[in-house]
Image (cartoon, rainbow, N blue to C red):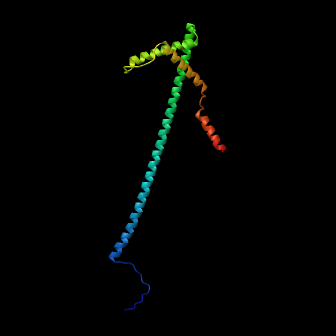
């Protein structure tokens, strides 16, 4: 062989073999594709998480709206019943005073009148062809007894605590533990 010794030489252009260039380009391309796939996977993961969070938030909002609607419907029903009771009380008092009977007799008359009104409404507005109801003074008297007993039983049941008081008690109990 030939022995050569080189001093300081400036190399400005290296030209590797075409197969080496192709291999190096393939390595760089594979790394870029892998990096892009990882970024796409992270982006898909973030999108799925955000969609799940949005569904959760929508479900919570729906549940809160449903609870609020039910609470308001209950309050409306309670106010309606209170108005009915107040109107009934006033009507019975006026009737008893005007006719000269006691409130129990007046209430029996109101129940009898409502019974007949109900029968009339069912007959006029219903598509029902047959309806079996107890009828006559004894049936109305029995209905009055049932209504009176339900009022007496309702007075024996303690009224529920407002939700705010229940939450405060639960919080105080947690804090004491």
Q: Residue at x 58, y 34 (%)?
A: 163
The image quarter in which residue 152 lies: top right
Q: Seen in the image, is 146 located left or right of residue 30?
A: right
Q: Image quadrant for the N terminus?
A: bottom left
In the rendered image of this protein, does residue 60 appear above or below residue 157?
Answer: below
Q: Residue at x 44, y 57 (%)?
A: 42
- Relative depth, front residue between 151 and 68: 151
The x and y percentages for residue 50 are: 45, 50
Q: Seen in the image, is 44 located left or right of residue 143?
A: left
Q: Residue at x 54, y 14 (%)?
A: 107
Q: Image quadrant for the C terminus?
A: top right
- Relative depth, front residue between 7 and 80: 80
In the rendered image of this protein, does residue 160 appear above or below residue 109?
Answer: below
How many marks can you see? 0
The image quarter in which residue 85 lies: top right
The x and y percentages for residue 153 are: 58, 24
The image quarter in which residue 160 lies: top right
In the rendered image of this protein, does residue 76 appear above or below residue 15?
Answer: above
In the rendered image of this protein, does residue 99 appear above or below residue 20?
Answer: above
The x and y percentages for residue 64 are: 50, 38
The residue most toward the left is 18
- Relative depth, front residue between 44 and 164: 164
The x and y percentages for residue 118 are: 45, 17
């Amino acid at each position: 062989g030939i022995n050569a010794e080189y001093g300081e030489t400036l190399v400005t252009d290296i030209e590797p073999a075409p197969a080496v260039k192709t291999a190096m380009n393939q390595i760089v391309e594979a790394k870029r594709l892998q990096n892009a796939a990882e970024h796409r996977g992270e982006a898909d993961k973030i999108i799925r998480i955000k969609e799940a969070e949005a569904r959760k938030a929508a479900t919570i909002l729906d549940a809160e709206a449903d609870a609020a609607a039910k609470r308001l419907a209950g309050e409306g029903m309670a106010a309606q019943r209170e108005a009915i009771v107040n109107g009934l009380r006033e009507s019975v008092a006026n009737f008893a005073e005007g006719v000269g009977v006691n409130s129990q007799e007046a209430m029996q008359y109101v129940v009898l009148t409502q019974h007949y009104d109900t029968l009339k409404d069912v007959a006029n507005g219903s598509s029902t062809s047959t309806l079996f109801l107890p009828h006559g003074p004894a049936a109305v008297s029995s209905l009055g007894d049932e209504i009176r007993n339900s009022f007496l039983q309702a007075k024996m049941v303690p009224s529920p605590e407002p939700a705010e008081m229940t939450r405060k008690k639960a919080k105080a109990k947690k804090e004491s533990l």
